[in-house]
Amino acid sequence: MSEFWTLERTARLLPARRRLRKALPPLLCFTDPARTPDPEAVAARLPRGAAIVYRHFGAPDAEARARRLAAITRARGLKLLIGQDAGLARRIGADGVHLPERLAHRAAGLKRANPRWIVTSAAHSLAAARASRADAVVLSVAFPSRSPSAGPALGPIRLAARVRAAGRPAYALGGVNTKRARRLLDAGLVGLAAVEAL
């Protein structure tokens, strides 16, 4: 429990949050079939105001699980974003979507069609971060990570430079935990994101 709350409290201290035009959660928890096999249990422990990003990767029970997550997040004052699947997000009344980098070009249209949604997109490069029209980009990899898709870590200095150059609200993902999160307080981020730390 302490990891959830400490990360969320650290994220709320990020100075860039004071300049937000749209309310964005301070903490994003990304699900993963292998590393978070029970996303409902994770959602039941997240602090109020955080968001869970449900990535179903085509699971046959995706809609049933998304509906369970929607019930938990509504009851606990959390946000629910659906990974990539805008149709599912609409059907279950989610709070928005998270787009992989290859689909980030859809962000502007999704925001126009769903003005209340939070739309985030992955950005593994500065070019992708600059091109995105999402409400916020998720930059990775911040620190060394055990994710099978993780590339070289940016570290706090290069991450901060990327945030400044991107010129848009950004989250840090990859190897973020309680200890490392403190090193990102001056990076210009609006929030923190994690998978295994949560």
Image (cartoon, rainbow, N blue to C red):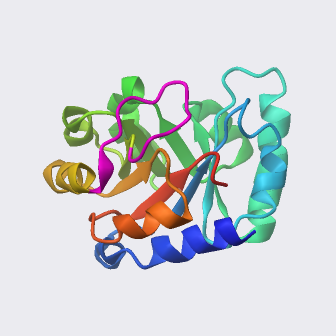
* Quadrant of image for the C terminus: bottom right
Q: Quadrant of residue 130?
A: top left
Q: Is residue 154 magenta?
A: yes
Q: Residue at coordinates 73% horizontally, 30% vertically from top-left? A: 33
* Quadrant of image for the N terminus: bottom right
Q: Is residue 197 visible to the viewer in this orientation of the structure?
A: yes
Q: Position of residue 142 (x, y in %)?
A: 38, 47
Number of marks in picture: 0
Q: Is residue 24 visible to the viewer in this orientation of the structure?
A: no
- Residue farthest to the left, as pictured: 165
Q: Residue at coordinates 61% horizontally, 40% vertically from top-left? A: 82
Q: Quadrant of residue 186?
A: bottom left
Q: Position of residue 54 (x, y in %)?
A: 66, 41
Question: Does residue 151 appear to the left or right of 114 in the view shown?
Answer: left
Q: Position of residue 49 (x, y in %)?
A: 61, 71
Residue 135 lies, with reference to residue 140, above or below; the image says below
Q: In this orientation, which residue lies closer to the viewer: 150 or 122?
A: 150
Question: Which range is magenta?
Answer: 142-156
Q: Residue at coordinates 47% horizontally, 70% vertically from top-left? A: 11
Q: Is residue 85 magenta?
A: no
